[in-house]
Amino acid sequence: MKLKRTFLLWFFILAGIVLGAMLAAVCKNVSFLSWLSYYQSIGFNADAPFVLDLSVIKLSFGFSMGISVAQIFTIAAAIFLYNKTNLR
């Protein structure tokens, strides 16, 4: 049963991320809601990744993650809804 709760939590969080991204895209051009689409990106720049050249093998590492205000709200709502579920 604990595995079901874990999967349900991840489902709610991923749904919050996707819905938040969609909400941010919709609100981007609405003047009084444009603040919901403000986002910040963190991580290694994907355009200039970290490169490890060992002469025999060359490895490139890159990671970037961006989160918007709308995603923060929808993730918080998703966690709140998850806590309200009665799956035990």
Image (spheres, rainbow, N blue to C red):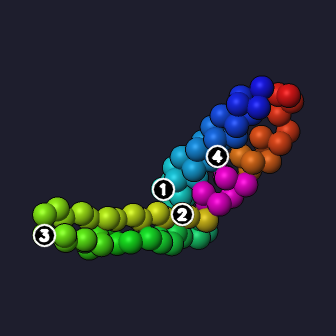
**Would residue 8 be seen by someone viewing this image from the given angle?**
no
Q: Secondary structure at mark 3?
A: loop
* Separation (CA) of disc 2 from disc 4: 13 Å
Is disc 3 surrounded by few (<14), some (14 to 19) or many (20+) residues within 10 Å? few
Q: Earlier in the sequence, mark 3 or mark 4?
A: 4
Q: Position of residue 46 (x, y in %)?
A: 31, 67
58 or 7, nearer to the observer: 58
Residue stretch rendered in magenta on the structure: 70-76
Q: Quadrant of the rendered structure where residue 2 is?
A: top right
Q: Nearer the viewer, mark 2 or mark 1?
A: 2
Residue where numbered disc 1 is placed: 25
Q: What is the magenta segment's predominant secondary structure? A: helix
- Sort mark 2 into few (<14), some (14-19) or many (20+) by Cα contacts within 10 Å: some
**Quadrant that contains the C terminus:** top right
Where does label 4 land, which residue? 13
Residue visible at 53% across and 58% down?
A: 24
Q: Quadrant of the N terminus?
A: top right
Label 2 to label 1: alpha-carbon separation: 12 Å
In the picture, measured across the screen, residue 82 lies left or right of residue 67, that is right
